[in-house]
Amino acid sequence: MVLSSSTKCKWVSIFVLLLASSASAAVEDGSLVNGDFETAPAGGFSSDAGISDGPASIPSWKTKGTVELVKSGQKQGGMILIVPEGAHAVRLGNDAEISQEVKVEKGSLYSVTFSAARTCAQLESLNVSVPPASQTIDLQTLYSVHGWDSYAWAFRAEEEDVHVVFKNPGMEDDPTCGPIIDDVAIKKLFVPDKPKDNAVLNGDFEEGPWMFRNESLGVLLPTNLDEETSSLPGWTVESNRAVRYIDSYHFSVPGGKRAVELLSGKEGIISQMVETKPKTPYRLTFSLGHAGDSCKQPLAVMAFAGDQALNIHYTPDSNSTFQAANVNFTAKAERTRVAFYSVYYNTRTDDMSSLCGPVVDDVRVEQSGSVRVRGLGLVLFLGYQLLVLVLL
Ligand SMILES: *[C@@H]1O[C@H](CO)[C@@H](O)[C@H](O)[C@H]1NC(C)=O
Ligand SMILES: *[C@@H]1O[C@H](CO)[C@@H](O)[C@H](O)[C@H]1NC(C)=O
Ligand SMILES: *[C@@H]1O[C@H](CO)[C@@H](O)[C@H](O)[C@H]1NC(C)=O
Ligand SMILES: *[C@@H]1O[C@H](CO)[C@@H](O)[C@H](O)[C@H]1NC(C)=O
Ligand SMILES: [Ca+2]
Ligand SMILES: [Ca+2]
């Protein structure tokens, strides 16, 4: 069949349109370009382990200050440098930074996931920013025995072209100290609709930061008091320590694919303010379980709902990795705080140092007796209908 030139023209313009729209489209969920730092620089990966004098050229990234590509197995001062994934990562020297420009949807909420390790025993931290928003992530606490962890940080896009920046704010005496970064990814978050019969937003924790399918450590959610820009929509991490966002590929998760593992005792608190009617009885229900990560028992949570606080122990049942738990409360205001922390400071039995704890999922706040009231209403309504019928 011969296409008429006008048809051909149409196809060409559709093709051009597609190309144009894909060129200006916002970044896709997943790794940033060369977010794993495995793309070789123009001159290849340098074989010697010294710090390069000139600015290191790292494909797709802009650098400032002493930024070094490090190799797994590379030694420094008798210490093997930690590369979270693959064969390469970057290290940021004093005051050094890397950045990448990404196209985003103005007004939307995004979460950046990245892996980081510290190199020296000193207090190290990392400033992650998408100007003007920024947060300093404390790398002092090691949550896993591997020496690195993944973290998530959220921002709201104020423009279409933004820079994702990682900066080492440190000024160490030893310039070869400084955090190592790997596996940088981004995800556009959506805020789930508030369910009709549940006052909790994202109570099943299914919406959250990007997680690499093959990364097994979960993602840490550091302190975040701003519920409007949270990597875990609806929730805040109101403690100075992080909680861990876990997936069902590597952990036991009560419902769906995602849940939260509480770490560091009362230093790791997640909370949400839910809408309530004052003087109305409610019931907070949730799943309480273990993550399947050899966490040393006992596991327990402190669950808060309004003025009620309940210490609930996880009682293992050989057939299940979780149990149902609940707290009854009467709302005192239009908004009620629901919060959880781990009662104990648990570590894994296999390495005795990785932090772990109880898992919380499927959090619901419902009016208690609402079903009964609705049922009663129906009975009254039917009774009235019957009465009308009889009278007629
Ligand atoms: C992090 O870096 C940004 C950009 O360089 C800066 O504006 C911000 O003040 C820093 N934030 C903190 C908490 O140090
Ligand atoms: C994880 O998956 C990514 C892409 O799917 C791959 O490039 C990377 O090497 C994998 N990492 C590990 C540790 O298997
Ligand atoms: C576990 O499941 C088996 C088979 O479904 C059942 O016979 C047993 O009673 C269950 N055990 C417990 C502790 O619930
Ligand atoms: C909450 O109330 C329900 C229904 O009255 C009851 O079954 C449940 O045991 C109560 N929960 C607690 C923790 O007291
Ligand atoms: Ca890598
Ligand atoms: Ca879930």
Image: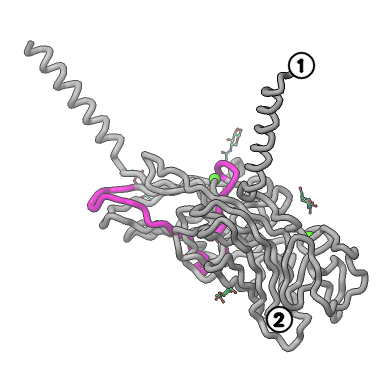
On the question of residue 340 being in view, the answer is: no
What's the residue type where badge 2 is placed? Asn
Under tag 1, what secondary structure?
loop
Q: How many marks?
A: 2
Would residue 259 be counted in the magenta stretch? yes
Q: Is residue 115 left or right of residue 52?
A: left
Q: Could you say which is closer to the camera, residue 17 or residue 324?
A: 17
Quadrant including the C terminus:
top left
Q: Could you say which is closer to the camera, residue 133 or residue 259?
A: 133
Q: Is residue 69 above or below residue 358?
A: below
Which quadrant holds residue 320? top right
Q: Nearer the viewer, mark 2 or mark 1?
A: 1
What's the residue type where badge 1 is placed? Val
Residue at point 58% right, 53% down? 104
Which quadrant holds residue 311? bottom left
Q: Could you say which is closer to the camera, residue 116 or residue 309?
A: 116
Under tag 2, what secondary structure?
loop
First reached walking from the N terminus: tag 2 or tag 1? 1
Quadrant including the N terminus:
top right
Q: Is residue 42 left or right of residue 341?
A: right
Q: Residue 94 shows which numbered tag?
A: 2
Instruction: State ligand 3's quadrant.
Output: top right
State the extent of the magenta-drawn residues as a range: 254-282
Neighbour tally class for label 1: few under 14, some 14-19, many 20 plus, Cα within 10 Å: few
On the question of residue 128 being in view, the answer is: yes
The answer to whether the residue labelled 2 contacts the one labelled 1, judged by CB atoms less than 8 Å apart, is no
Q: Is residue 215 left or right of residue 132?
A: right
Q: Is mark 2 within 8 Å of ligand 1?
A: no
Residue 207 position within the rendered picture, expressed as x and y whole percent measured from the top left? 54, 48
Q: Residue 2 shows which numbered tag?
A: 1
